[in-house]
Amino acid sequence: MPALRQTPATAFTFYAYSVPVAFYAYRLRNEGQRALGNYAPVQDFSKDIYDRCREWENLPGVYCASVAPGYAYADVPDIGMSVFVVTNNDMTLAEKVAQDLSGLAWSLRESFTEPLPDAEEATQLAMKHVAESNSPVVIADGADRIGDSTYMLKELLAQKAKNWVIPCITDPKAARWLEDNSKVGDKVELIIGGWYDEFSGTPVEVNGTVEYLGRPTYTLVGPMGKGARVREGFVARINLGDNRHVVVAERMLL
């Protein structure tokens, strides 16, 4: 088993691994676990950190240098950014690399707290970009999965945006009603979302045509869970007109 030494400092956690050279293949098999993959990072401050990782990995004796950003939405106090380094049984080198990467990340910490637009501004910016460039825009919810939150749906409707899709509003009650009372092609009127708690927003009334009903099954093709078969719960897709679509799901889609 590889030796493990943890050295906490400032706001980061350091994991410096000292392992035999035969352990090198482990990194190759798990390259998909790197927080950012082969695709180019879109934020300059993140790119600086991961470019430094690659610089260290190009030097002799450093088999893996990686930074995990952490997960801000968990109820665990020590789940911030972490640095992972694998060397060929050289703890001094591993510590040096970990300290360098954490120091760089810490120096860029203010860049990670730039203010993000709210739902109203994000919708305005997206509509402006589409009008000027005629290219698609993804509005990413900062909390990963939106659940039954209706804020973006309400804003898109309020600003009369066209040509969009809300990929999933989780609403078991609405999904069951659609399964029991509708078929593809039906015109429906129902209230969705905003049922779980006060943070989810308020329910929204939608009117449209049912375009899909079913329990989709598919195979994961990305690095996470590649090859696994997934069977979702009941899903309905509703066309609200003007190429506006909302997906209502029995449970949160993967």
Image (cartoon, rainbow, N blue to C red):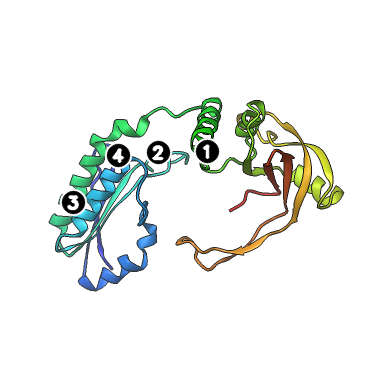
* Among the 4 quarters of the image, the one containing residue 28: bottom left
User: What separation in Å lies between label 1 and label 4 (alpha carbons)?
Assistant: 20 Å
For the question of whether residue 125 can be seen, the reply is yes
Going by the numbered disc 2, the residue's amino acid type is Pro
Q: Earlier in the sequence, mark 2 or mark 4?
A: 4
Going by the numbered disc 1, the residue's amino acid type is Ile
Q: Are marks 4 and 3 in contact (CB under 8 Å)?
A: no
Q: How far across and how far down the image is residue 101, in percent?
A: 22, 46
Q: How far across and how far down the image is residue 41, in percent?
A: 35, 47
User: What separation in Å lies between label 4 and label 3 (alpha carbons)?
Assistant: 18 Å
Furthest residue in direction right, as rendered: 181
Q: Which mark is residue 97?
A: 3
Q: How far across and how far down the image is residue 70, in percent?
A: 38, 44
Q: Name the residue beneath numbered marker 4.
A: 45
Frontmost of labels 2 and 1 is: 1
Q: Name the residue beneath numbered marker 2.
A: 77
Q: Which mark is residue 148?
A: none
Q: For numbered disc 3, what is the local secondary structure?
A: helix
Query: 83 and 202: which one is in front?
Result: 202
Q: Are marks 2 and 1 in contact (CB under 8 Å)?
A: no
Frontmost of labels 2 and 4 is: 4
User: What separation in Å lies between label 2 and label 3 (alpha carbons)?
Assistant: 25 Å
Frontmost of labels 4 and 3 is: 4
Going by the numbered disc 3, the residue's amino acid type is Val
Q: Name the residue beneath numbered marker 1.
A: 139
User: What separation in Å lies between label 2 and label 1 (alpha carbons)?
Assistant: 28 Å
Q: For numbered disc 1, what is the local secondary structure?
A: loop
Residue shown at the point (28%, 68%) measured from the top left:
1
Query: 132 and 21: which one is in front?
Result: 132
Frontmost of labels 3 and 1 is: 1
* Left or right, residue 200 beside residue 125: right
Frontmost of labels 1 and 4 is: 1
